[in-house]
Image (cartoon, grey):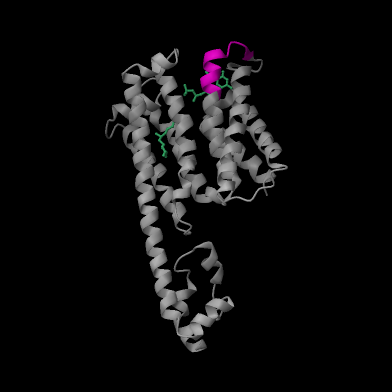
Amino acid sequence: MVAQIILLSPLVRQPLFSTRGFHSAFLRSTGGLLRLPPQIRRRLTHGGLRLYVAEAVNFEAMAIVQDGIGALLVTAGAYSLVFAFDELTKRNIIKQVWVFNSEQSLSRKVVHVLSGLLYMASWPIFSSSIEAKYFVAVAPLLNCIRLLAYGFSIFTDESLVNSVTREGKSEELLRGPLYYVVVLMFCAIFFWRESPVGIISVAMMSGGDGFADIIGRKFGSVKLPYNCKKSWIGSISMFIFGSLFSILMLYYFSILGYLYLDWRVTPEKVFLVSLAATLVESLPFSEVIDDNITVPVTSMLTASLLFT
Ligand SMILES: Nc1ccn([C@@H]2O[C@H](COP(=O)(O)OP(=O)(O)OP(=O)(O)O)[C@@H](O)[C@H]2O)c(=O)n1
Ligand SMILES: C/C(=C\CO)CCC[C@H](C)CCC[C@H](C)CCCC(C)C
């Protein structure tokens, strides 16, 4: 039977699917020797191999269908969000809700806050397959292509420009919004729902930096001593909302069983990450390097040190 197992080991050497339970059953075959847990080995020795492989292929096929549908839904959600806020701005509904010195900025900031948080909130609809994170990255990838196409005016999309730019200029799409979706894609692929680092980084970029702008622009009369373009209330808002959204998202993924955190120390760690990101965001070099780069990068570095 060992020969049969070795004959089939090229089939099973690579995990045909990668649920956490079964994936751990597969060890990278070294020298063709395959080590499986006893309950699986018993099935192999009693001719269950074909059924096992069939189940594995079936599971993988189901995971691909699930993840493909998830990618479609998230992509549709992204388009709907941008379209909805363009319509709200056009109908002056945003202006009625919040008298803002420029309703486009409010629309842009609300899209900024919601995109990252809703994107992370969608992650549990994807399967536990190793390949799932690549399906998760499809929505930000398509938006990256969309922003490049419209930013270079290869195509035009008024709704996108109106919803996510300051002054309604298409070339603005190639800065803040583009960096934003690249960060989402990076965090989905390299951290996803299995690491607090990416979750905190996206929460700080979307929820923290977004509220710094919304609150700071409206109430930020007392400016920072070292940066006349930023205010105390804006930075305090970034720290508070960045910490709040980070903790809420970590808790969300914890209760769903994706994260196992020590909640006796997690809040303090989040506060330290938020403090670091807030300090960096308040510095005057955001004219040179966009906040959608400095905030997530600072969060990733700090969180990687604290959540090792
Ligand atoms: N710590 C902060 C951050 C932002 N702001 C207010 O929010 C505005 C925009 O903030 P910024 O971080 O520069 O966001 P951007 O994405 O660069 O702005 P925009 O959305 O216009 O591109 C600032 O001019 C300021 O009025 C603030 O008062 N304090
Ligand atoms: C205005 C923005 C940044 C400037 O600071 C945010 C730009 C957002 C993108 C145009 C759209 C990104 C959508 C996400 C990739 C997916 C969101 C899915 C969710 C279900 C709405």
Q: Which residue is drawn at 38% across and 37% down?
A: 78
Q: Main secondary structure of the magenta part?
A: helix
Q: Which of the 4 image quarters holds residue 174?
A: top left
Q: Where is residue 295 in the image (x, y as percent from the top left)?
A: 57, 33
Q: Is residue 53 magenta?
A: no
Q: Is residue 214 above or below residue 249?
A: above
Q: Is residue 15 above or below residue 96?
A: below
Q: In this view, does 119 lie to the left or right of 160?
A: right
Q: Which residue is drawn at 66% across and 37% down?
A: 270
Q: Where is residue 140 in the image (x, y as percent from the top left)?
A: 41, 42
Q: How many labels does the image show?
A: 0
Q: Which residue is drawn at 39% across and 30% down?
A: 173
Q: Does the magenta stretch include residue 217?
A: yes
Magenta stretch: give its range.
Answer: 212-223
Q: Is residue 82 left or right of residue 24?
A: left
Question: Quarter of the picture for ligand 2?
Answer: top left
Q: Which residue is drawn at 49% across and 82% down?
A: 44
Q: Where is residue 95 in the image (x, y as percent from the top left)?
A: 39, 15
- In depth, the one of 53 and 185 nearer the eye is 53
Residue at the left extreme? Answer: 155
Residue at the right extreme? Answer: 264
Does any portion of residue 20 appear in the rendered image?
A: yes
Q: Position of residue 148 (x, y in %)?
A: 36, 37
Does any portion of residue 288 appear in the rendered image?
A: no
- In depth, the one of 304 and 228 nearer the eye is 304
